[in-house]
Image: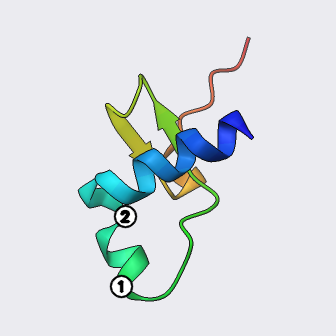
Amino acid sequence: MLNLKRFLKYRDNYEEFKEIKESGKIGLPCIVVNDGEQIIFDYNELEVQKS
């Protein structure tokens, strides 16, 4: 339940979700980085480091 509350805090208060909410979508999946510093909706934007 804590993770849902955290997600709703971002969704309800961050501009990045405005277009998503207006189109009737939820906004999942998304990745929140550094407590909202960056919100990523497209996994293709992530750079995966290989070890």
Q: Position of residue 7 (x, y in %)?
A: 55, 47
Residue 49 percent coordinates (x, y): 63, 21
Task: Answer with mark 2 or mark 1, whichever residue precedes in sequence.
Answer: 2
State the SS at label 1.
Answer: helix
| Amino acid under disc 2 | Phe
From what the image shows, is residue 18 above or below residue 11? below
Q: Residue at x 41, y 26 (%)?
A: 35
Q: Secondary structure at mark 2?
A: helix
Q: Which residue is mark 1?
A: 22
Residue type at mark 1 is Glu
Residue at x 75% of width, y 41% of height? 1
Are there few (<14), some (14-19), or many (20+) residues within 10 Å of tag 2? some
x and y, in percent, of residue 22 in the image: 36, 85
Question: Which residue is under mark 2?
Answer: 17
Task: Say above or below: 20 vs 16.
Answer: below
Residue 12: which disc?
none
CA gap between label 2 and label 1 equals 9 Å
Residue that appears at 49% across and 87% down = 24
Q: Determine the residue positioned at 43% across, 57% down.
A: 11
